[in-house]
Image: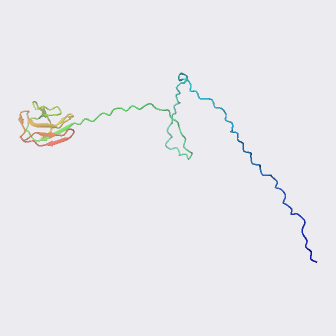
Amino acid sequence: MTANKKSTSKAIKSPAPATKPAAKPAKSKAKPAVAPVAPVVPPKAEAIAPVTPPRVTVAPAPVSAPVSSAAPVAVALAPTAARVVAPVASKHLVTTVTARINVGFGNALCLRGEGAGLSWDRGVQMTCFSANEWLITLPESARPIVFKFLINDATWSTGSDYSAVPGTSTLLSPTF
């Protein structure tokens, strides 16, 4: 007995899900509403009062205080006025001339020349600081100093004129 039995039963669908999928919102062609913005009007200049920020004084931490691992704290400092820099006094460039010569007991060694207050007409006496060394310190000069030695401001040294660069020390041994 073979019978073709055709199934007349319908397939059973699974039950509907517990929640319905949300419906897609309908697109509208209307523009979103924008709230009106009031125009910004600057206040009058005379109504603004200058604001002075409070001064913040930060005391230094004690040397033996442990270092904290907390995050750094920003401290607002009051603006400072422009700092005034005091002018630095320039160092004067003095020129030192030393002569190594024994001019004899009772005699003096003088210097004549040009630059640093020297003159060819009248000599400036040098200072004797040992038996055979004479010293003079000349003031600042803008140009080289040219000079010649004299004994007792009367007897000239032999040879050509000597010269010194301003701001230097020069050691010479003149001959007479």
Q: Is 158 on the left or on the right of 74, as rendered? A: left
Tally of marks: 0
Give the residue displayed 14% in from the left and 37% down from the top: 146
Task: Tell which of 164 and 37 is nearer to you.
Answer: 37
**Residue 107, quarter of picture:** top left
Task: Tell which of 68 and 140 is nearer to you.
Answer: 140
Give the residue displayed 8% in from the left and 36% down from the top: 150
**Residue 110, quarter of picture:** top left
Q: Residue furthest bottom?
A: 1
Q: Is residue 65 above or below residue 82?
A: below
Answer whether residue 160 is visible to the viewer in this image: yes
Quadrant placement of the N terminus: bottom right
Q: Residue 94: horizontal and vertical position, in percent?
A: 22, 36
Q: Residue furthest top?
A: 46
Answer whether residue 130 is visible to the viewer in this image: no
**Residue 47, quarter of picture:** top right
Q: Is 130 on the left or on the right of 45, as rendered? A: left
Q: Residue furthest right?
A: 1
Type of colouring: rainbow
Q: Residue 13: horizontal and vertical position, in percent?
A: 85, 60
Give the residue displayed 49% in from the left and 38% down from the top: 60
Q: Residue 167: horizontal and vertical position, in percent?
A: 22, 39
Q: Residue 7: horizontal and vertical position, in percent?
A: 89, 68
Task: Tell which of 2 and 150 is nearer to you.
Answer: 2
Quadrant placement of the C terminus: top left
